[in-house]
Image (spheres, helix red, strand yellow):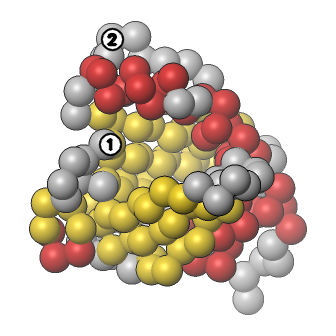
Amino acid sequence: MSDNASNDRELRLELTLNAPRDKVWRCWTEMPLLDQWYCPRPWQAVFSEVDLRVGGATRCVMKGPGGESHESNGVYLEVVPGRRLVFTDAYSQGWVPSGEPFFTGIIELEDDGNGGTRYTAIARHWTADASRRHAEMGFHDGWTAAARQLEALAATLEDAA
């Protein structure tokens, strides 16, 4: 894992997941699977929409163990099946600008040559301050924990028919 020191608005996580790329992709794109790993436990994600196309909406509520909740809505900007997913909270469905955008997420998946997946998660923020706040909120620990939950779930999935 490493921060991109040349860009004070970007946070980056790079991991190798012990699960095939197609199953990691499924975990990122199928709503019932997203609900199982997307937040580091004991938090829980509840997705109500995953419209996997450019301009398609994604809607999620993250619920904490003390009753806290955080709504996370946005749209997909790029969908390259099995390889790349780009989403942002800067817009809601219909390209309506959101009130206060926080970041754009970029997920890149590559085969590692050993049956696993090279996993890169990038969070690009509108300001250096937003990036710093995201880092202080626990970006690296939280996104690593969620990625490891994704890895464990992906490893349990059956091969597609």
Kindly state the secondary structure of the residue where label 2 is placed.
Answer: loop
Q: Is residue 11 visible?
A: no
Instruction: Report the side of 70 relative to 58 (left or right).
Output: right
Q: Nearer the viewer, residue 89 or 79?
A: 89
Q: Residue drawn 81% across and 72% down? A: 157
Q: On residue 103, which mark appears?
A: 1
Neighbor class of circle 1 (other Cα within 10 Å; few <14, some 14-19, many 20+) is many
Q: Residue at x 40, y 21 (%)?
A: 132
Position of 38 relative to 15 (above/below): below
Q: Residue furthest left?
A: 96
Left or right, 160 with reference to 152: left
Residue 40: x, y in percent?
70, 48
123 or 92: which is nearer to us? 92
The residue that disc 2 covers is 6
Task: Note whether 5 is above or below 1 in the view shown.
Answer: above
Locate residue 156, reporting x and y percent. Answer: 86, 68
Task: Identify which residue is drawn at 64% across, 38% down.
Answer: 142
Residue 66 appears left or right of 93:
right
**Secondary-structure class at tag 1:** strand
Residue situated furthest front in the rendering: 66
Callout in the foreground (1, 2): 1
Disc 1 versus disc 2: distance between alpha carbons?
18 Å
Q: Is residue 30 above or below residue 4?
A: below
Question: Residue 148, image x and y in percent?
Answer: 76, 45
Q: Does residue 75 appear in this view? A: yes
Q: Name the image quarter holding residue 97.
A: bottom left
Inspect the image, locate mark 2, and give the three-letter code of the amino acid beneath it: Ser
- Amino acid carrying label 1: it is Phe
Query: 66 or 152, which is in the foreground?
Result: 66
Query: In this view of the protein, which residue sits in the foreground, 76 or 38?
Result: 38
Residue 15 horizontal side relative to residue 101, left or right: right
The N terminus: image quadrant: top right
